[in-house]
Image: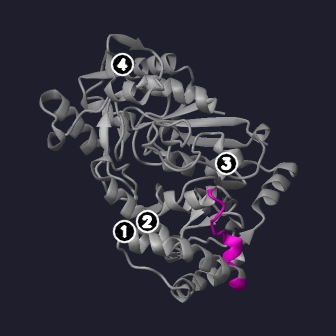
């Protein structure tokens, strides 16, 4: 049976939730392999839209086992709230499995995250201040606290004591913040331990046994390629490996198990937080004027471009084929799911960035030098739109307007991979399966 990795290919918010929710029911297991509750997937249950931040999307299907892998960092309080939300909607999470090796976000991680961002001022990265980065820092420094530690009160107390010996002086003397006692941490975290203990599992063994038994697995990424700690627009990135290779690292399943890699691409581009964004159409409040401001505002309004987790207004711009091609290479994409094509229906003409220019040099590839990318100017091709054509009812590629078909075919040529799923409206079934197997 096939196992599939699903990843974002831009700066996140490409509509991974819809595509994951659409195909998850075909899989026996759906596994989150990186990130924390700084990510958000919107899934549909009846007439209700639910925002999942830690829970794998497979929880929506009775036949599917949702798994939180070792590469995820878990805020126990956030996960317990999510479980309560699902329970209120009558959705069972009884099948949930949590890796005993996943790291725990502690209260001081959140404090340090917010304080670091404040200290950086205008150079801030734009984190969600949920403690994700500091938790991954402790993991890399071999000072982290894992789910399995939370389940052993004696070990947990010893590790909290060691952590606070280091964190409290930083909180107090550098940032002037509240410090913690061991008992404060224990009193906050141990109730979560009692709730989560039944779901703890040796997930690496579980998943490899499932593969040997012929089961199929969907590895569900959060964030996106351009936010990858190694391959993204560093330092304006997240703290984990959110490209396809991270699925192996974050679960303990070897890469030879992956038969398909699906990349989610929005029909335009958005970004949240700081960092370079060559095709950005600036909002008026950020200095945009004329056509640029009009395009940015229109994309944001029609596309409802506000963060699931943060509510922040997303930066918006035209499709960037340079980034698209890079994502195909980095992830080894076999398929692309193109989302939000319907948003472009409101435009007479549509621009596509095919290269960059900086200091008289043309870049047909993503320049690695940070200074070049920051100053890169997009080189656009302009394509005719399909304004006035309602594509929300299209269910085959041939039903799309001719200009929409040409737009998709051109993007395929530019990035070098087939667009086998095309989303034409927000609803789950408003998707064209274009030779997707």
Q: x, y percentage for residue 50?
A: 45, 62
In front: label 4 or label 3: 3
Q: x, y percentage for residue 226?
A: 48, 37
Q: Which residue is mark 2?
A: 112
In the displayed structure, does residue 80 sit left or right of residue 146?
left
Q: Mark 2 and mark 3 in contact? Answer it, CB < 8 Å.
A: no
Q: Earlier in the sequence, mark 3 or mark 1?
A: 1
Whole-angstrom CA distance, mark 4 to mark 1, is: 56 Å
Q: Which quarter of the figure is the C terminus placed in?
A: top right
Q: Which residue is mark 1?
A: 175
Whole-angstrom CA distance, mark 4 to mark 3, is: 33 Å
Whole-angstrom CA distance, mark 2 to mark 1, is: 8 Å
In front: label 2 or label 1: 1
Residue at 73% across / 39% down in the picture?
258
Tell me if I can see residue 82 in this picture.
Answer: no
Q: Secondary structure at mark 4?
A: helix
Q: Mark 2 and mark 1 in contact? Answer it, CB < 8 Å.
A: yes
Name the residue nearer the viewer: 272 or 67: 272
Name the residue nearer the viewer: 242 or 58: 242
Q: Earlier in the sequence, mark 2 or mark 1?
A: 2
Whole-angstrom CA distance, mark 3 to mark 1, is: 42 Å
Tell me where the magenta segment starts and ends, as one range. 141-154
Tell me which corner region of the image, top left, top right, bottom left or bottom right, holds residue 267.
Answer: top left
In the depicted structure, whether residue 83 falls above or below residue 61: below
In front: label 2 or label 4: 2
Q: Which residue is mark 3?
A: 218
In front: label 3 or label 1: 1
Q: Which mark is residue 403?
A: 4
Q: x, y percentage for residue 417?
A: 57, 23
In the displayed structure, does residue 295 sit left or right of residue 263?
left
């Amino acid at each position: 049976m096939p196992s599939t990795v699903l990843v974002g290919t831009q700066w996140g918010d490409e509509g991974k939730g819809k595509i994951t929710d659409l195909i998850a029911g075909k899989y026996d297991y759906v596994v989150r392999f990186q990130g924390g509750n700084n990510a958000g997937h919107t899934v549909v249950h009846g007439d209700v839209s639910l925002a999942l931040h830690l829970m794998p999307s497979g929880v929506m299907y009775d036949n599917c086992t949702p798994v939180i892998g070792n590469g995820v960092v878990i805020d126990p309080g956030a996960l317990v709230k999510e479980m309560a939300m699902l329970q209120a909607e009558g959705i069972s999470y009884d099948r949930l499995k949590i890796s005993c090796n996943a790291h725990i976000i502690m209260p001081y991680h959140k404090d340090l995250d917010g304080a670091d961002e404040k200290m950086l001022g205008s150079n801030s990265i734009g984190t969600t201040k949920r403690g994700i980065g500091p938790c991954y820092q402790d993991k890399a420094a071999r000072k982290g606290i894992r789910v399995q530690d939370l389940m052993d009160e004696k070990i947990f107390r010893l590790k909290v004591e060691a952590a606070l010996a280091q964190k409290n002086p930083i909180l107090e003397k550098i940032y002037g913040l509240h410090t913690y006692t061991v008992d404060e941490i224990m009193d906050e975290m141990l109730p979560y331990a009692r709730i989560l203990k039944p779901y703890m599992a040796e997930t690496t063994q579980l998943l490899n046994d499932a593969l040997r038994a012929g089961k199929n697995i969907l590895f569900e990424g959060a964030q996106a390629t351009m936010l990858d700690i190694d391959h993204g627009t560093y330092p304006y990135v997240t703290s984990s490996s959110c490209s396809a290779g991270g699925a192996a690292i974050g679960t303990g399943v070897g890469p030879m198990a992956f038969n398909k890699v699906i990349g989610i691409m929005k029909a335009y581009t958005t970004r949240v937080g700081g960092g370079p964004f060559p095709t950005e159409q600036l909002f008026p409040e950020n200095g945009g004027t004329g056509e640029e401001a009009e395009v940015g505002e229109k994309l944001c309004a029609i596309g409802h471009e506000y963060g699931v987790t943060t509510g922040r207004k997303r930066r918006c711009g035209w499709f960037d084929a340079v980034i698209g091609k890079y994502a195909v290479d980095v992830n080894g994409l076999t398929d692309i799911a193109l989302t939000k094509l319907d948003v472009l229906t409101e435009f007479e003409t549509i621009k596509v960035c095919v290269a960059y220019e900086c200091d008289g040099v043309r870049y047909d590839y993503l320049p690695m030098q940070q200074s070049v990318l920051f100053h890169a100017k997009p080189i656009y091709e302009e394509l005719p739109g399909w304004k006035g054509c309602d594509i929300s009812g299209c269910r085959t590629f041939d039903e799309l307007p001719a200009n929409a078909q040409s737009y998709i075919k051109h993007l395929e040529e530019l990035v070098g991979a087939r667009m086998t799923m095309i989303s034409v409206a927000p609803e789950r079934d408003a998707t064209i399966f274009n030779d997707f197997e």
